[in-house]
Amino acid sequence: YEMNSLKVIFDRDTWQEIFGSISKNKTRTIITVIGVLWGIFIYIALSGAAKGLDNGFERQFENIAMNSMFVWAQRTSIPYDGFKIGRSIELKLSDIDYIKQRIPEVEFIAPRNARGVFGGSSPLVVRNSKSSNYNVYGDFPEYTKIATKKIYDGGRFVNEEDIRYRRKVCVIGERTQTELFEKDENPIGQYIKIDNIYFQVIGVHKFVPGGGFESDGDIFIPFETFRQIYNTGETVQWFTIAAYDDADVVAVEKDVKAALKRIHRVSPKDERAFGGFNLGEIFNKIVGFSKGMTHLSLIVGIATIIAGVIGIGNILLISVKERTKEIGIRRAIGATPKSIRQQIILESVFLTATAGMLGIIFGAFTLYIMDSGFGQGPDAALINPTVNIPIILISCTILIFLGTLIGLIPAHMATIIKPIEALREE
């Protein structure tokens, strides 16, 4: 009657006894198994949702550096160095060198000017008999190192030659092309008038939402050309700044504002003189939230799984108690304590693994529903909510380990039953 472990696993009689034991207490078994199932389900669903949230945020801001920020000048709120309160401040091109020299964490800094944003009127753009109003930006090529511009084939963005020679060239938006040009007409090389000045179209940019004030109708021209046409001189409306990947973006923003306060003679305590929008800080908060959500799901899942596994152990203890006479008969006809122990442990592992598999299946199905309901379209909140396969495999391994561990107790109780006493049991 002695059997090795492998033989026990594949023995038909062993599985008949296991299913027979389970079928005697179907309701009790199902209720207890749900505990393990629910724990795995919670972990899969919440972890996948957190991953989907990360993916959704990254797609929304895929065209701009995650460690970037915008800084602009406002009015002073504290009198300082002989200046009265309410003084209007203007950023200057010369501020760039000062910032770069004193803040090594800054990787890129791009000055920007615009017409049509921040409440201003958009310039009139004319092409033959068609016209409309669009926002116009003055930019350096360095801006594309911070915010990627997707230019359709055959076109390009502003380059250094355009800046040096103050060329009257422009990059238009895909909506601008639709509204000013014929359906099958190639706008590259054609001319449009911006505030009665002719500009040659050198590219059409594909609009990707997120990361700034821009829209699908925006027009980009060289910064120096913008400066000449609108007579802005050294004035800059705002800086778009990207820090290095390992830099603390919140600290970099504070350092940049502190440097600007020194340049423009603003009180170090004045928090209103310069405004800012820190995309890196927001991204870090989103990442922190998703990590917290993942950790919470892990804690709740493990606690629920452990509770469920303990419940399975209790079921097996009761089962052993109810099967005392049966076990006594098996012992009397030659069954060894080892074979009894292996069967009880196998039953524990089977229940735990089955519950875990069902939890994984239901969790995966829930993630599929999430993806279908919230993961489609350009403004999707959750993108591809998934859980890595290695994590699933580790979860399964842990379940098998816990099932084996919790099965040792009822297995030991079964092996210490003496055949004679068991046969007397009523």
Image (tube, rainbow, N blue to C red):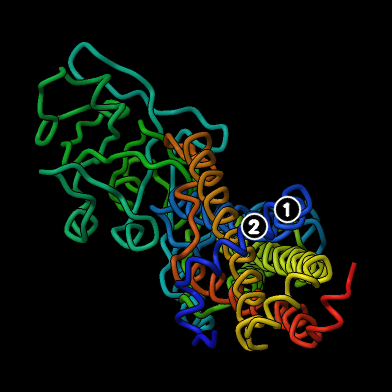
Q: Closest to the observer: 194 or 329?
A: 329
Residue 132 is situated, as x and y percent measured from the top left of the image, at 34, 19
Residue 341 is situated, as x and y percent measured from the top left of the image, at 66, 83
In percent of the image, x 75 and y 63: which residue is there?
308
Label 2: element kind: helix
Q: Residues within 10 Å of mark 1 (few under 14, many from 20)?
A: few
Q: Mark 1 points at which residue?
A: 24
Q: Closest to the observer: 69 or 41?
A: 41
Find the residue positioned furthest to the top.
129
Label 1: element kind: helix
Direction from residue 82 to residue 370 in the image, left or right: left
Direction from residue 134 to residue 2 in the image, left or right: right
- Residue 268: quadrant of the picture: bottom right
In percent of the image, x 88 and y 72: which residue is there?
425
In percent of the image, x 25 and y 14: which residue is there?
130
Q: Residues within 10 Å of mark 2 (few under 14, many from 20)?
A: few
Q: Is residue 256 visible?
A: no
Q: How far apart are marks 2 and 1 (CA)?
A: 6 Å
Q: Closest to the observer: 150 or 284?
A: 284
Q: Name the residue under label 2.
A: 20
218 relative to 8, above or below: above
Where's the C terminus, which quadrant? Answer: bottom right
Residue 251 is situated, as x and y percent measured from the top left of the image, at 64, 75
In percent of the image, x 22 and y 45: which residue is there?
151
279 relative to 80, above or below: above
